[in-house]
Image (cartoon, grey):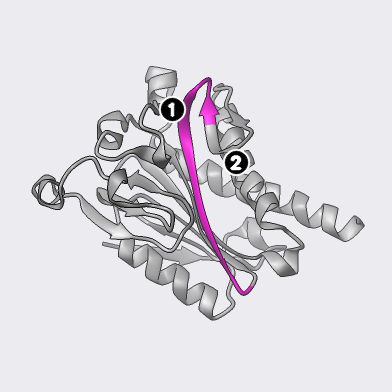
Amino acid sequence: MRWESGFMARERHFPIPVHRWDAAVPYEEAARRQEESAAEGREALILCEHAPTITLGTSAGPGDLAFSSLYYERMGVTVLKSPRGGKATYHGPGQLVGYPILNLRQRGMTVHGYMRFLESLMIRLCAEYGVQARRIDGKAGCWIGEKKIGFIGVRVRRGFCFHGFSLNITPQREAFRLIVPCGMPDLHVTSLQEELHDSAPDLRQAADRMEELFFELLAGVDSIRKTA
């Protein structure tokens, strides 16, 4: 597995390295990278996809799992506890996962404002491909109608945020039946491929554009802070 990292030309005003893998990566590896960056006070952006994994946030309990641990083991799905907020979610191939590690305190962002920033990223990416997504008051994430396409779970430690968002690029409905997603048993999920059919981007294309949007939106946040 090749690890890709480095500074991109568009980052000259943002000394933030972008880290990407060229294959599905174990959740634990990405989590370790995040912990290291946050502990060392280094901002970064990780974009990746994971091998099939269920993560249980700080609000999750046994009732958020639909099956036994033996069933998940037989299915080849890893189940892990995560220090992020929220309940149970699923990560797997065909899902774009983003982990921005940012100094919220230095950038003048509240946790609430940061979560809206992540929602805006996913809404903007959907709009790039002609899909009208939205946020719903009181329900974190990115929605198309009443179906959820993007998920958020963050943690903040000493002013640094990590963990982040996931956006379904290919269909994930069967995988999400392995859990009670976000504590919502009747939740319906969708993906860009289901909404767009043949015109949907592949995951690498979506990651390329997400990277660009991240720096565009972050520039806007910094501009507002400097003029405030």
Q: Position of residue 51 (x, y in %)?
A: 26, 51
**Vertical placement of 102 versus 201: above or below?**
below
> Residue 79 at x, y = what percent?
25, 55
Q: Position of residue 214 (x, y in %)?
A: 61, 49
Q: Residue at x 12, y 45 (%)?
A: 75
| Quadrant showing the N terminus | bottom left
Q: Is residue 147 magenta?
A: yes
**Residue at x-position 59% and y-position 28%:** 127
| Residue 47 versus residue 177 in the image, above or below | below
Q: Is 103 one of the magenta-colored residues?
A: no
At label 2, the amino acid type is Glu
Please tell me which residue lies in front, 112 or 150.
112
Disc ID at residue 192? 1
Q: Main secondary structure of the magenta part?
A: strand
Q: Secondary structure at mark 2?
A: helix
For the point 60% across and 66% down, the residue is 16
Query: Which stretch did the figure color magenta?
Result: 143-158
The answer to whether one can see residue 92 in this image is: no
Front disc: 2 or 1: 2
The C terminus sits in image quarter: bottom right
In this picture, residue 76 sits left or right of residue 148: left
Using residue 134 as the reference point, say whether residue 26 is left or right of it: left
Q: Do residues under tags 2 and 1 come within 8 Å of each other at their CB atoms?
A: no
Q: Residue at x 59, y 34 (%)?
A: 123
Which quadrant of the figure has residue 133?
top right
Using the numbered discs, state the Cα–Cα distance from disc 2 to disc 1 in whole angstroms: 15 Å
